[in-house]
Image (tube, rainbow, N blue to C red):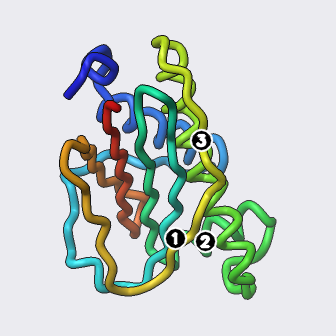
Amino acid sequence: MNTVTSQFDVAAFMQQQVRDVFQTMAALEVKPVPIQQDGNHHERISGVVGLGSETITGAVYLHLPLPLAEHITRQLLGLEPTDPVEEAAVNDVTGELTNMVAGGLKSTLCDRGVPCAVSTPTIIRGTAYEIEVLPDVSRYCLSFDAGPFQFNVEAHLKQN
């Protein structure tokens, strides 16, 4: 794609970053699997964190099935599996997980001489939405298995 991302394997980095974040934050072992495209017609929550600098722009997306996001939220809050969980808490946890994944990518870019900043997380909820990629943007899509759940992570990067 460009000199910045050709210096390292973005997909391999993101795989390790996602595994580390989920293990550390949620005590959840996740494993990379072949990309899963199921039409995105189940209820899900997506966290989005933008990346930007003079030389690179992009975003990181974390797409979780809503039951997985609720499970992680209950775990982090010390709730029982059947306890209700507030929508705002699920949004916060999803945003923070996304922020941590994006933060790792930001740090790696900074370490490679590309200082950049991240935005605050944004949340998308729904049953049928797609993320479309603009021209000249490299898209890295990864799928992970988390027990009975599967989820996707995307990184979109564009050299300015």
- For marks 3 and 1, give the CA distance: 25 Å
Quadrant of res 40: bottom left
| Quadrant, the C terminus | top left
- Could you say which disc has been placed on residue 118 in the image? 3
- Give left or right: position of 141 versus 64: left
- Give the percent coordinates (x, y) of residue 106: 53, 31
- Give left or right: position of 141 versus 125: left
At x 69% / y 82%, what residue is drawn? 87
Quadrant of res 70: bottom right
Residue lying furthest right in this view?
A: 78
Q: Earlier in the sequence, mark 3 or mark 1?
A: 1
Amino acid bearing label 3: Val
Disc 1 marks which residue? 68
- Could you say which disc has been placed on residue 71 in the image? 2
At x 50% / y 38%, what residue is drawn? 52
The residue closer to the viewer here, 83 or 93, is: 93
- Give the percent coordinates (x, y) of residue 41: 29, 85
Amino acid bearing label 1: Leu
Tell me the crowding category of disc 3: few under 14, some 14 to 19, or many 20 or more residues within 10 angstroms, Cα based: some
Q: Earlier in the sequence, mark 2 or mark 3?
A: 2
Q: Is residue 47 above or below residue 106?
A: below
Q: Nearer the viewer, mark 2 or mark 3?
A: 3
Tag 1–tag 2 contact (CB < 8 Å)? yes
- Give left or right: position of 105 versus 14: right
At x 55% / y 32%, what residue is drawn? 104
Element at label 2: helix
Amino acid bearing label 2: His
Tell me the crowding category of disc 1: few under 14, some 14 to 19, or many 20 or more residues within 10 angstroms, Cα based: some
Total numbered badges shown on the rendered structure? 3
- For marks 2 and 3, give the CA distance: 26 Å
Q: Is residue 109 above or below residue 102?
A: above
